[in-house]
Amino acid sequence: LEKIAHEKACIMKKGVPCISAPQEPEVRAVLERKAQEVGAELIYADENIALPELALKGAHQRVNARVAVKAYAN
């Protein structure tokens, strides 16, 4: 997980907010370290974001929708 997190974190850019779904502690540590290293704001889309009823099924779809809403709001 940490290796994958590091590869994905490489898209972070200085001054550009990075929105992420909530992560496990080891992944979170990698993302936070990379964000600090490059000067990017790291924002987590938490479960408190209200969503309408989704046509797509699966818990991961709700997580993806929260990330999209958080990105739109920022």
Image (tube, rainbow, N blue to C red):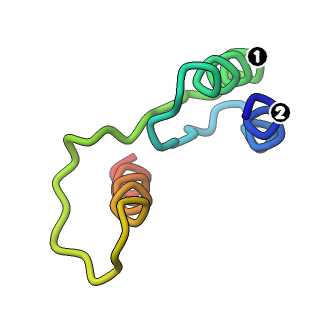
- What residue is disc 2 on? 3
Q: Quadrant of residue 42?
A: top right
Q: Residues within 10 Å of mark 2 (few under 14, many from 20)?
A: few
Relative to residue 38, is residue 36 drawn left or right?
A: left
Q: Is residue 18 left or right of residue 45?
A: right
Q: Quadrant of residue 10?
A: top right
Residue 4: percent from the left, percent from the top? 78, 40
Residue sticking out furthest to the bottom:
55
Q: Secondary structure at mark 2?
A: helix
Q: Would you call the spot at circle 1 few (<14 residues within 10 Å), some (14-19), or many (20 or more)?
A: few
Q: Nearer the viewer, residue 23 or 40?
A: 23
User: Which one is earlier in the sequence, the residue at label 1 or at label 2?
Assistant: 2
Residue 37 shows which numbered tag? 1
Q: Residue at x 25, y 76 (%)?
A: 54
Residue 47 image position (x, y, % from top left): 26, 42
Say what amino acid the circle numbered 1 marks.
Glu
- Residue 3 position within the rendered picture, expressed as x and y whole percent measured from the top left: 83, 33
Above or below residue 74? Residue 40 is above
